[in-house]
Image (cartoon, helix red, strand yellow):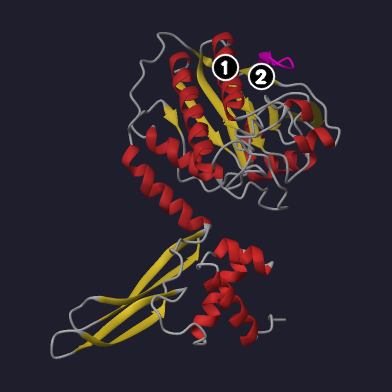
Amino acid sequence: MPSPPVPDDVLIERVTAFQANGNNQVQTADILGISRGALQQSLKMAARRGLMGTSPVLPGYQIKKTSTQLGPSGELQREWIQQAPDAGPEFNVPAGHMVKGVSALVDANNRIVQQWIKTKEETQTDLIAAIKEEFEQYRGAAQLIQPPKETFADLMQVYPVCDPHIGMLAWGPETGESNDLKIGVDRVNNGLQRLMSLAPPAETAVIIQTGDFLHADSQSNATPASGHQLDVDGRAQKVKLAGVQLLRRSIDYALQKHSRVIVKNLKGNHDPESAAWLNIALGLFYSNEPRVEIDLEDGNNDIWLHLFGVNYIGATHGHTMKPERMAMVMADDNPEYWGASKYRWMIFGHIHHETVKEVGSVRCESFRQPVPKDAYAHSHGYRSGNSMSSVTLHKTDGEIGRHKINFPRGA
């Protein structure tokens, strides 16, 4: 129910106290036993009801017009003062909204008298369009890197990037190990570079980002579906910039080792919208680099399927399906790849620890996350190590080797 109006006698009491204390709001509010904000609202109400006289300028009002009457000798005889409620606070576009249009009331001289600003909630379509427009200026900005002198055409090196949760904040005394934006970026960057230095010079490299690349999708710092509150280090734009720079450095490093680099970003439950704009940003940046393959128009960021020789490879985040469903998706979505393959491998993350389950002929494998756990995972008893891996595939022989970089606690 709305609050009842403040009686005139109460307003008069507060106005009298205010004037008796030299118009000092803090002192008056203290004497009356009310907050300063309540006193300010009372003064505005009193002014509107005519309980404060007409002495300029009333609290919450501004002078709109003045008129004077002068005597025969030029002396001031009468003065008229027209006041109007003061302007409200400065307008800011609400969070998650964008300006839809502006309407204006103008006078005979085309001067603005009043203006209306219309906003609407920003949708994913609006966001993608804005990102494309913003990153268009960076189209083809990547400097071409000299390809390696020799690579093996029969080899593909797969670099899964699983659940790095860039921007996640963890406090060591609470979780056993600290993490922040810098620690996370450095760990993933160094892990990928070490894996690439150990890998054979395969002609083709795949950097497959399986989702939850960013800890939060927006400045709300909550998971979009469940609204689970997240601990994030830094503003959303700062975290996103760090994520793009991390992937760009990794691609540049891969170009020095491999002749062809395929990059795929998938949706996670923490960052379902980020996969699309990561593909757009990186796709435009490397648009003039024929050795980098990023489909910036790809609308399917839930599942990735690829055929290399007799190797059928798939990837998904893992929050929308179990391994049994993953195997069925591989067979159903691309029967041509299924028929041409001898070795079938599905990569996923989400659970932050290593598992392997064979579903028929499909090896469904989850990987550890490279960064420490957050407060939620720690409080729920989740415990696992941190590492990153890369896997070498042969066109006809399937998997022939892998490397692993472990991150000991506190490293």
- Indicate the quadrant where residue 169 lies: top right
User: Could you say which disc has been placed on residue 168 in the image?
Assistant: none
Tell me the element at label 2: strand
User: Could you say which disc has been placed on residue 389 in the image?
Assistant: 2
Quick one: which residue is furthest to the left in this view? 73
Nearest to the observer: residue 69 or residue 400: 69
Image position of 15 with respect to 354: above or below: below
- Residue 15 position within the rendered picture, expressed as x and y whole percent measured from the top left: 56, 77
Q: Amino acid at mark 1?
A: Asn
Image position of 225 with respect to 102: above or below: above
Q: Is residue 275 magenta?
A: no
Q: Is residue 404 magenta?
A: yes
Considering the image in quadrants, where does the N terminus appear? bottom right
Q: Which residues are magenta?
A: 398-411
- Residue 172 position within the rendered picture, expressed as x and y whole percent measured from the top left: 74, 25
Nearest to the observer: residue 191 or residue 67: 67
Count up the numbered dots: 2
Classed neighbour count for the residue bearing mark 1: other residues with Cα under 10 Å, few (<14), some (14–19), many (≥20)? few
- Indicate the quadrant where residue 79 lies: bottom left
Instruction: Tell me the distance, in whole angstroms, between the alpha carbons under discs 2 and 1.
Output: 12 Å
User: Could you say which disc has been placed on residue 190 in the image?
Assistant: 1
Quick one: which residue is furthest to the right in this view? 381
Q: Amino acid at mark 2?
A: Ser
Which mark is nearer the camera, 2 or 1? Answer: 1
- Residue 337 position within the rendered picture, expressed as x and y whole percent measured from the top left: 62, 35
- Residue 11 position within the rendered picture, expressed as x and y whole percent measured from the top left: 60, 81
Residue 333 shows up from this direction: yes
Tell me which residue sits at (40%, 8%) in the image: 149
